[in-house]
Image (cartoon, grey):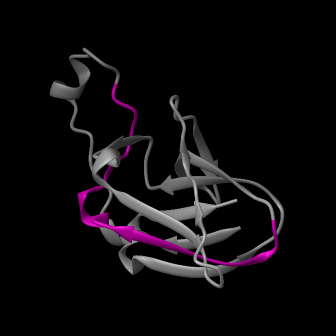
Amino acid sequence: MIIFPITDKKKEFKLGYGLYSVYFTGGFSLENLDLLDIHLYNSETKETITLKEKTLKPRDYINNQKAIYCYEFQINEFGTFTIELKNPEVLIVKNRFDVPFSLMKYIIPNPTTKQENINLIIK
């Protein structure tokens, strides 16, 4: 499992063959994911790895933290890979899941997670 704060913006790591999942921690609701620019590539060959966005974003707990499953990708060779985040400051993670058209979100505030507490997890 690879874990790093999104404020680091870049991380290099080794992966083998397999299907991997990308999560963001800090809450159960995401905003502005479409504005976040993520690039994953093989560090040696510079080949880009396609991240497939999940239409439904399941919620989970990873290392006792709330997490949202956002992307998946396939690796077909062992190697060193780099993931780069551009505009990580646009990502907003809220503590709980907002139900659409719910009045609760106007009555009870839904605190956001500070940027330095949001992690990207690959597992």
Identity of the residue drawn at 41% across and 63% down: 118
Identity of the residue drawn at 49% across and 56% down: 25
* Quadrant housing residue 7: bottom left
Quarter of the C terminus within the rendering: bottom right
Quarter of the N terminus within the rendering: bottom right
Identity of the residue drawn at 44% across and 41% down: 28
The count of marks equals 0
Query: What x and y, as percent, mark residue 10?
Result: 46, 79
Left/right placement of residue 76 relative to residue 84 reads right
* Quadrant housing residue 77: bottom right
Give whichever of 26, 47 is nearer the camera. Answer: 47
Query: What x and y, as percent, mark residue 100?
Result: 30, 19
Identity of the residue drawn at 22% across and 31% down: 108
Query: What x and y, as percent, mark residue 31?
Result: 30, 43
Q: Tell me if residue 105 is in the magenta stretch.
A: no
Q: Give the answer, above or below, for where 109 lies relative to 45.
A: above
Q: Give the answer, above or below, for where 17 lies relative to 13.
A: above
Left/right placement of residue 51 relative to residue 32 reads right
- Residue lying furthest left in this view? 106
Q: Give the answer, above or below, for where 10 lies relative to 16.
A: below
**What segment is highlighted magenta in the picture?**
77-98
Query: What x and y, as percent, mark residue 4?
Result: 52, 74
Give whichever of 9, 26 is nearer the camera. Answer: 9
